[in-house]
């Protein structure tokens, strides 16, 4: 498959926002009501976390210039939520004693089950290990849990 994985930039924020909405609306219908999905998109659950982009720990996947996936990891205490989440803990984690956080994976519905999530996860694991993290943790939605369980 000819997709490119690269670090996200601040210029990617509008496209990431669109991708998140498309992913959530397209892949969460079996697990959440329309009202729950729309509420999560408007509040703190889903959204771009600028800290991840600035830290260089958030990745996008492209095909022919179109974003088809995104996800990353964090060296900060915040476990979930986009910029609109007001209760953020931006303090950095101690890689010797605390696990890094897998964060905000989204794949476009037309591109699921093609290795995009796995590719991002492997990149996250590798990059976190370079910075001294030995373990990673995550909090997942019911829809996201399905993907993460496949990877163990």
Image: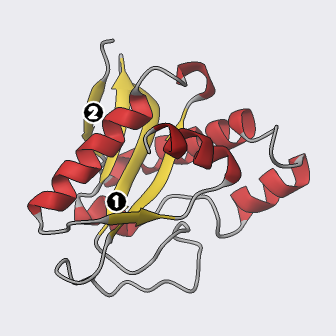
Mark 2 = which residue?
5
Mark 1 = which residue?
73
Instruction: Measure the alpha-carbon separation of dots 1 and 2.
Output: 14 Å
Residue shown at 80% from the left, 45% from the top: 31
Q: Residue 6 placed where, x, y %?
A: 24, 38
Residue shown at 74% from the left, 39% from the top: 25
Q: Residue 119 placed where, x, y %?
A: 32, 34
Q: Is residue 49 above or below residue 38?
A: below
- Check the picture and name the quadrant holding the N terminus: top left
Question: In which quarter of the view is residue 69 placed?
Answer: top left
Q: Nearer the viewer, mark 1 or mark 2?
A: 1
Choose the circle earlier in sequence order: 1 or 2: 2
Question: In which quarter of the view is residue 67 placed?
Answer: top left
Q: Nearer the viewer, residue 139 or 14?
A: 139
SS category of the residue bearing label 2: strand
Q: Is residue 87 above or below residue 60?
A: below
Question: In which quarter of the view is residue 127 placed?
Answer: bottom left
Q: Tag 1: Cα neighbours inside 10 Å, few (<14), some, or many (≥20)?
A: many
């Amino acid at each position: 498959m000819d997709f490119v994985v690269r670090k996200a930039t601040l210029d990617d924020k509008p496209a990431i926002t669109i991708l998140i909405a498309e992913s959530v609306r397209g892949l969460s219908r079996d697990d959440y009501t329309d009202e729950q999905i729309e509420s999560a998109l408007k509040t703190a659950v889903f959204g771009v976390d600028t800290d991840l982009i600035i830290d260089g720990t958030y990745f996008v996947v492209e095909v022919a210039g179109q974003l088809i996936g995104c996800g990353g990891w964090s060296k900060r205490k915040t476990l979930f939520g986009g910029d609109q989440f007001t209760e953020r803990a931006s303090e950095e984690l101690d890689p010797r004693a605390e696990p890094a956080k897998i964060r905000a994976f989204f794949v476009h519905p037309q591109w699921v089950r093609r290795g995009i999530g796995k590719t991002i996860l492997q990149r996250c694991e590798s990059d976190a290990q370079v910075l001294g993290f030995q373990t990673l943790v995550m909090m997942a939605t019911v829809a996201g849990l399905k993907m993460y369980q496949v990877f163990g």
